[in-house]
Image (spheres, rainbow, N blue to C red):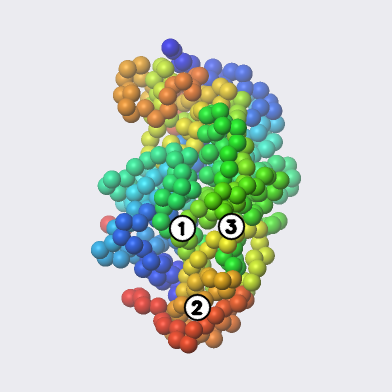
Amino acid sequence: MNKIVANPEEALKGVESNMTLMLGGFGLCGIPENSITQLVKLGVTGLTCISNNAGVDDFGLGLLLQGKQIKKMISSYVGENDEFERQMLSGELDVELIPQGSLAERCRAGGAGIPAFYTPAGYGTEVAEGKEVREFNGKPHILEKALHADFAIVKAWKGDTEGNLIFKATARNFNPMMAMAGKITVAEVEELVPAGALDPNEIHTPGIFVQRIFKGLKFEKRIEQRTVRQK
Amino acid sequence: MALDKNGIAQRIAQELQDGWYVNLGIGIPTLVANYIPDGIEVEFQSENGILGMGPFPFEGDEDADLINAGKQTITATKGAVYFDSATSFAMIRGQHVQLTVLGAMEVSQNGDIANWKIPGKMVKGMGGAMDLVASAENIIVAMMHTNKAGISKLLKTCTLPLTGVGCVKKVVTNLAVLEIKGNQFHLLERAPGVTVEEIVAATEGTIIVPDNVPEMNLEI
């Protein structure tokens, strides 16, 4: 199989306004930079974006917010972005904040054919409003539903022509689960290799979940908080 | 004298037990990693996908792909492992992490905790906090006893949106160590030089004071 596409334009063919997108990454770590640039270029609007964070003002998803392309964000933490907070408090942006573990599991469930599951996270808080509650082992749990996306856009370190992916360090985060849950999954990688180059024992995400793969031209890999210790 | 944030972290580090897996929240809790007692080995889990979180790198060694939950650059210890977010929260929700340390804006006398939202003012999101507090066997809250306006953060009932209900067991503040049991705060230790009266005055919730309240044993 050859799932390689030449560039971001090919990779995101078919993305339309008002679609639901999943975007991998934790903070600025492991975000699909080249695809985000392409989404800005496409100028699609009314997007629902499922992503753990909202980037910073001038990088990552922040670029889509600046261009007022996002109608709704589904995230667990959005603290690093002032434009985000402004749009949210003014009502321009609809925001659903959900516990990070529930976000991860909802994406996984979406890709795994599990329509809903119970979790203790959020019971007794705003997150539980409107959700069914059931007790297991004497402890209350809330029912959370699977998440799906028209396109899941993920970033990996290495990928092959079959779409098999390997991630690096903490740039892995949400990428594997989102890759499972997209109707069409696009993977942008740093290193693109032929089938057989990756050891089957070491692959993190099987290519069955991936429809299109391309090598990103450039990765800035911005560091949000550069913390060091003294020698 | 009341503790500073390092003092709070140092006192909490005394709770660490050999062989424990520990999750440290952003803020004061991250400092706990600087005070691991001699002879104790613990492994730090960071919710964004690393077990075996190490100290900050030396200048020049920063890796953009290696960060903690607070988005700071870190290193990985020998024997560290990386994994995805679903696996990370399986560790947390599945009670494989022995201790969670996190900050709070408010804690109530029945163990409720509020640390993610001030309506209309600050809505950054809960991140992994709700998963952590709903699942952890041991939860220690690290915080100042009063907020910047001098108002107690140890309350009868939380006023802010909750992160979790009835889950906090221990609180370490700049003034004291307290346990939460039977819908009451129980005073266990005083910060060096701090009086019981000061602590009681700074606590809005019901607080039980034993006859003798020892000072924390810290080498500051």
**What residue sits right under mark 2 in the picture?**
B187
Q: Mark 1 against mark 3, which lies toward the viewer? A: 1
Report the front residue among B213 and A156. Answer: B213
What residue do we see at 47% from left, 74% from top?
Answer: B177
* Quarter-of-image position of residue B111: bottom right
Numbered disc 1: what chain? B
Q: Mark 1 against mark 2, which lies toward the viewer? A: 1
Q: Secondary structure at mark 3?
A: loop
**In the depicted structure, whether residue B34 falls above or below residue B69:** below
Give coordinates of residue A141: x percent, y percent: 59, 48
The three-letter code of the residue at mark 3 reads: Gly
Q: Quadrant of the C terminus of chain B?
A: bottom left
What residue do we see at 50% from left, 19% from top?
Answer: A212
Rate crowding at label 2 as few (under 14), some (14 to 19) or many (20 or more) other CA atoms within 10 Å.
many
Give coordinates of residue A88: x percent, y percent: 69, 46
Mark sitting earlier along the chain (3/2): 3
| Spatial separation of the CA atoms under disc 3 and disc 2 | 22 Å
Residue A193 appears in the rendering: yes
**What residue sits right under mark 1 in the picture?**
B137
**In the depicted structure, whether residue A111 falls above or below residue A96:** above
